[in-house]
Amino acid sequence: MRAEKIILSLLIFGSIAFAGDMHRLELFVMSKCPYGTQAETQIFNLISQHSELTDEIDIEIHYILDYDSSSESFRSLHGQKEVDEDTRQIIIRKYYPDKFWCYLMSKNSHYQDTLWVKDAEMCGINPEKLSKYIKKSGYTLTLSEAHLTDSLNVNASPTILLDGVKVRDWRGDLPTLYTMLQNLLVENKSKMKCEKNVECPPKAGYLSSCVDGKCKYTEAPLVTLKIITLDTTRYGSSTFSIVRFLREETGNLKTTYVPYGDDKSKDILRKVNDALKPEYAAESSSYNLTKGDEKPVSEIKSLPVYIISYNINKYPSFNHFGSYLIPCELDGDSVYIADPNTYPARALLDRDEKPGKLDLFIMSKCPFSKAVEESLLAKDFSGLDIDSITLHFVIRYDSETGKFESFHGRPELVEDKRQIIIQKYFNEKLWDYIHCYNISSKSDSCMKSLNLNPKDIDEKIRKYADSLLKDDFNLSDGLKIKSTPTVLIDNRYILRNSNDIQKYFKIILESGRCGN
């Protein structure tokens, strides 16, 4: 019965004409996401019931996944099985467009498993030929899909774009989607009918709302974003993701950078902190947003600082992220300050500056940590003494049990302890050992080649390693460093991504990190 229904409904999709002047609905999903598959089914049911919509709306399905350039592989939220199914559906979309929806609806009825051959055969797709197409074009087409979702900053399944503009707050119900698409086809916007905001299709550069049963469009206000940050020519920029997020959410954003250090930047920060007094904090629920045992901040002592114009609250999506913003008055204007508890700090202004001090946070089995270590060893840096770099190991610590855990499992924890002991008691041999271990992964051979006594090392591990690791945990936890590689410069400035690290040290690195 299910197969008959699918094939019968396919007659409708087989007649869809693809024209350049059609409206476009793009649905971004993960193939094993229950909400994504539900959205696909709802769209299928809608078009099956209202075939007239297919004359003017081109429907495209896209897949949300990430590309790891270091391993030339793909990642998806639900694992490798989802990547495989994404690729399979991408290939069917490319080479069997008239059978795509047949396969999709059949497969979605059991999306959790990895079975697919019968679904393909039922829709007239030869499994062996499909596998050959996957081997031939799967990587290239999946890579294009990953680049598309990344460029659009799409990461939630499902996400709908209508004519290139993201739909907000659709909860997956059929009547709302039908009304939205009907309104999309109405040329005279004043004749659109609605009962709620989401039924008014989005329009680039405008805010849409449902007022007295009709869709109302007002020009989107210009949102200004002022960022007090480090000198980006030296330390790189950590602000790109937030700028991209706000630009996407508003479509009308003006960004100004104020490099920290001169009188202007310090004066702005002083005014911000004057506005963020404890008595003011008590009046603002969003101001008291904290993580764990953190106390509400009464003074910002880190960078970057984000100052956002108050009209950001005019945007519907403000309901989703407004709790992360602190309202205050600055120079007579109402503004929002991004809560510093909710994003990683790049400069810690309350720490003593120690010029020339370098701390490298690593995991001993993290390939990206090893890449930094080897790059530092391979290049002769003017003014940089490799032996002056202090290594710190990023691990997890359970204060109740007193036990440590490492991101790459127990073998990494054992090696972390070995390296922290060598650094403490045999520092002059540390980098030679690290180079040997990074190449061979044979700790005993490396110690022997450097005349390090394994028994002596093991004895010191038993006596001192836990205490040293706990010190590293307290440091990294206090700095909110949970991934590697990370660099602390001059005891104050933090580089958290590969691009900034390679820019600072003038080295070449693959992009990537280990940890959360």
Image (cartoon, rainbow, N blue to C red):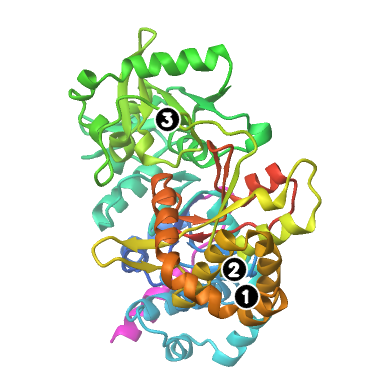
Q: Residue under circle 1?
A: 138
Choose between 75 and 271: the one closer to the eye. 271
User: Which class describes the residues within 10 Å of circle 1: few (<14), some (14-19), or many (20+)?
Assistant: some
Q: Position of residue 178 (x, y in %)?
A: 30, 53
Residue found at x 58% / y 65%: 422
Residue 13 badge: none
Q: Position of residue 345 (x, y in %)?
A: 46, 38
Above-or-below relation of 224 to 445:
above
Inspect the image, locate mark 1, and give the three-letter code of the amino acid beneath it: Gly
Q: Earlier in the sequence, mark 3 or mark 1?
A: 1
Choose between 417 and 81: the one closer to the eye. 417
Residue 206 badge: 3
Q: Badges 1 and 2: C-beta atoms under 8 Å apart?
A: yes
Inspect the image, locate mark 2, and give the three-letter code of the amino acid beneath it: Thr
Above-or-below relation of 258 to 294:
above
The local secondary structure at tag 1 comes to helix
Q: Which quadrant of the view contains residue 187?
A: top left
Q: Is residue 20 magenta?
A: yes
Residue found at x 29% / y 42%: 198
Residue found at x 39% / y 8%: 331
The local secondary structure at tag 3 comes to strand
Q: Is residue 100 shown to the viewer in this render? A: no
Q: Residue under circle 2?
A: 142
